[in-house]
Amino acid sequence: MDPEEVARVCDDLHECIEQGPGENPDVFARALGALLTLRESVSWDYPLGLLMEIEVQLARWFSPRGFSADEQQRCREALLGDISRLEDAWNRPRV
């Protein structure tokens, strides 16, 4: 998967996050589909770890339980930060 494709999938994740928080099974399924697309193409451990963390955070983001304003902001920032790190770290660094 080239960097442009990764960016497009990550943009889709951003759109999904903007439709939360709260229970939204259709958007959650779309976000998980985006993660699966990325997971199928990941080539090294660091981005794979980020994908797993993002999946856990998305499950929380789209859960029916409510958030306080502070929790919501922290969760949103963590998701967006991990997606940004994922894009930056997609290709294995050359040594």
Image (tube, grey):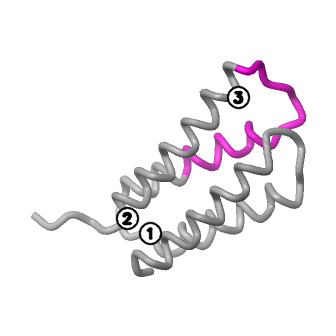
- Residue assigned mark 1: 42
The amino acid on which the numbered mark 3 sits, given as a three-letter code, is Gln
Q: Position of residue 27 (x, y in %)?
A: 82, 58
In magenta, the rendered stretch is 52-69
Q: Quadrant of the C terminus?
A: bottom left
The residue drawn where x is 65% and y is 40% is 57
Q: Within the image, what quadrant is residue 76 found in?
A: top right
Circle 3/circle 1 CB separation < 8 Å: no
Q: Which label's residue is closer to the chain start, 2 or 3?
A: 3
Instruction: Determine which of the numbered discs, if any, sits on residue 90 in the image.
Output: 2
- Residue assigned mark 3: 72
User: Label 2, label 1: how many angstroms apart (C-alpha)?
Assistant: 7 Å
Circle 2/circle 1 CB separation < 8 Å: yes
Q: Closer to us: mark 2 or mark 1?
A: 2
Count the marks: 3
Q: Within the image, what quadrant is residue 30 found in?
A: bottom right
Q: Position of residue 71 (x, y in %)?
A: 68, 22
Q: Position of residue 86 (x, y in %)?
A: 43, 56
The residue drawn where x is 54% and y is 36% is 78
Q: Which label's residue is closer to the chain start, 3 or 1?
A: 1
